[in-house]
Image: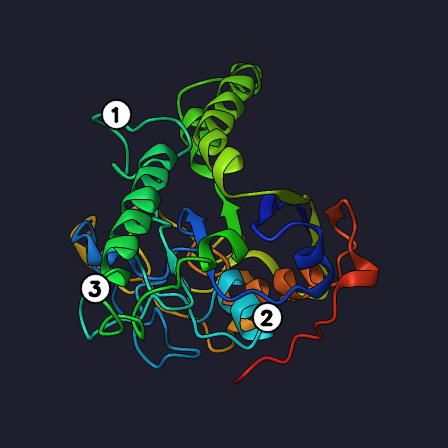
Amino acid sequence: MALLVAALLCLGGGVAASTDFRFPAVFNFGDSNSDTGGRVAAGLESILPPYGSTYFGAPSGRFCDGRLIVDFLMEAMDMPLLNAYLDAVGDPSFQTGVNFAQAGCSITPANPTSVSPFSFGLQIKQFFAFKDKVTKLLSKGDIYRKYIPQADYFSQGLYMFDIGQNDLAGELYSRTEDQVAASIPTILLEFETGLKGMLLTIIHETILIYACAFTGFENPTQACCGYGGPPLNYDSRVPCGQTVSLNGNPVTAKGCSDSTEYVNWDGIHYTEAANFHIASQILTGKYSDPPFIEKMPFVIKPRF
């Protein structure tokens, strides 16, 4: 099964940073592919077991059975997993970065029927609000330093963007493929507009992660946690982990016994195994433009 995976890595520290790939902080923007708890923290949705069961042992705010691509990339750099920007419970630390990603968000501005109000443009505004707040807190001395980035981390950090699938998926529900294709320039223009301010003030170099192929999975299209059986094991009326009534009978979307054999977790999102595979491929550098194979020192060592 081949799948196009589009992502953008933006390096705040310029050419030297792209050689070393050592960053003091990471700032992530995106949708459910990299949401580490933002949507749940916003109160827009709750996540039930078996989400999180593979690694965290309980739902972790991620739409997955375990870790996401961004989690594996953080682990590869020997950095703590990113906390969601809106997560204020449990004294979260943002010292080594913050995650603005929100499940359901789009690049284009949200409208009354959007799954999430946190569009890409709003995430960018949240970032600048966060940066301004950090600057003010740092001016008050050392009391907050263990919770927030240092001022120069913003110019030296790694910025990651993985977003856009909801713009296309939403369009496909009501338009033809040709109409959706025709909308792509508008979506890209919106992305460019949202990114422009950051490119001018913070980001100095970009790397495009453009493609990845899934191989070796026994069940490349069937959902691990779903209802309906082969070939897809997915019914949008029966979300993963929930029991609903269909034709007067209770039915439950249960998780499979071994998610490592699946690419698809719940009919929409990847399994931890698929996320690990993608992260491993990203870290080879061969799917990047420009390629950075000779500059990438990481060999991913998952913590199971």
| Secondary element at tag 1 | loop
| Secondary element at tag 2 | helix
The reply to whether discs 3 and 2 touch (Cβ–Cβ < 8 Å) is: no
Q: Which residue is mark 3?
A: 140
Q: Residue at x 30, y 64 (%)?
A: 61
Q: Which is nearer the eye, 152 or 59?
A: 152
Of callouts 2 and 1, the N-terminal one? 1
- On the image, the x and y values in percent for residue 202 come to 50, 43
Mark 2 nearby-residue class (10 Å; few <14, some 14–19, many ≥20): some
Q: Which is nearer the eye, 109 or 54?
A: 109
- On the image, the x and y values in percent for residue 153 come to 46, 59
Kind of residue sitting beneath label 1: Asn
Kind of residue sitting beneath label 2: Glu
Of callouts 3 and 2, the N-terminal one? 3
Q: CA distance from mark 3 to mark 2?
A: 51 Å
Q: Is residue 173 above or below residue 183?
A: below
Q: Which residue is mark 2?
A: 261
Q: Residue at x 40, y 30 (%)?
A: 170
Nearer to us of marks 2 and 1 is 1
Mark carried by residue 111: 1
Q: Quadrant of residue 293?
A: bottom right
Of callouts 1 and 3, the N-terminal one? 1
Kind of residue sitting beneath label 3: Lys
The reply to whether discs 2 and 1 touch (Cβ–Cβ < 8 Å) is: no
Q: Is residue 184 above or below residue 137?
A: above
Residue 33 in sight = no
Q: Which is nearer the eye, 254 or 106?
A: 106
Nearer to us of marks 1 and 3 is 3
